[in-house]
Amino acid sequence: MSQIVSGSQIAEIAALVGDPARANMLVALMGGQALTAGELARHAGVSASTTSGHLAKLAAARLVSPSRQGRHRYYRLASPEIAEVVHALMVAAGVGPGRYRPVGPRDAALRLARTCYDHLAGRLALELADTLHRRGHVVQCDGGAVLTEAGRLFLTDFGLDLEAEASSRRPLCRTCLDWSERRPHLAGRLGAALLVRLLELGWVARLPESRALRVTGAGEAGLAARFDFREDWRCDPLATNTGRAA
């Protein structure tokens, strides 16, 4: 049951997220995988003891959820709703004042393909959304998205389980503003199912300690054949500009 939230409660959560170390931990968990305290310490650039204190505060506020497996304790974002909050803050930060910063390989990899909690983001996600829209499989309008019957048949034939979590309140298909591309990609149960299927097929692979995804050779061929990807979908508009961060 939802409850009325006060301004002081909002300020308390905002203060927790506002710490740079804790913010870096939350961003690292946007990869959708559970991480250890040691892994989060490296992402945050702080000591193990400092990390423990930060994680205790985040867990107490129910922003992260800890679980133990063997000798290790793992942390993940507490819910898809928390992931949406973190993503919204990333979008807000991305449209803030521009700062000159040379574009490095890590930035390019994240903009090409990455995880946005449990679904795809980056130019890979945008090309998928555009292709499904062109084919009439997904209709985007008014900031939302609807899966058509033709789209349901196509994606089911591709191997997606669109009935997973069907009993939950989570929508089947919705859009999520891509913070690096400034256009919406697909989220919801459909977006999550696409990520799972591409990983299963080996078309994309996770990069260690990063939210970036590598598109494999099999993925390049499969995406071109099955989704009719454009030849220039990888083109990075920031590669030839002045290096202003996206």
Image (tube, rainbow, N blue to C red):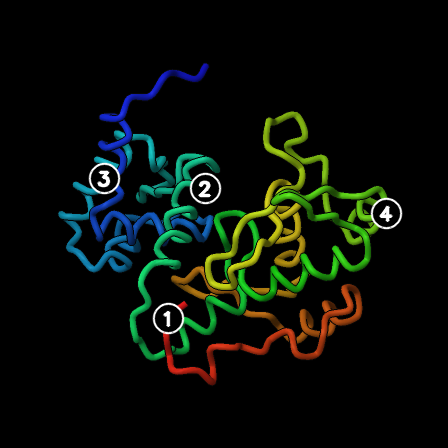
Whole-angstrom CA distance, mark 3 to mark 2, is: 16 Å
Q: In the image, 119: left or right of 139?
A: left
Whole-angstrom CA distance, mark 3 to mark 1, is: 25 Å
Residue matched to label 1: 245
Question: Can you give x and y, in whole percent of width and height, for residue 91 in the image?
Answer: 42, 53
Residue matched to label 3: 16
Q: Secondary structure at mark 4?
A: helix
Question: Can you give x and y, in whole percent of width and height, for residue 29 in the image?
Answer: 39, 49
Q: Please tell me which of labels 2 and 1 falls first in the chain.
A: 2
225 shown above or below 118? below
Q: Please tell me which of labels 3 and 4 falls first in the chain.
A: 3
Frontmost residue, 123 versus 94: 94
Q: Please tell me which of labels 3 and 2 falls first in the chain.
A: 3
Query: Do we see residue 129 in this rendering?
Result: yes
Whole-angstrom CA distance, mark 2 to mark 4, is: 29 Å
Q: Residues within 10 Å of mark 4 (few under 14, many from 20)?
A: few
Amino acid type at mark 1: Ala
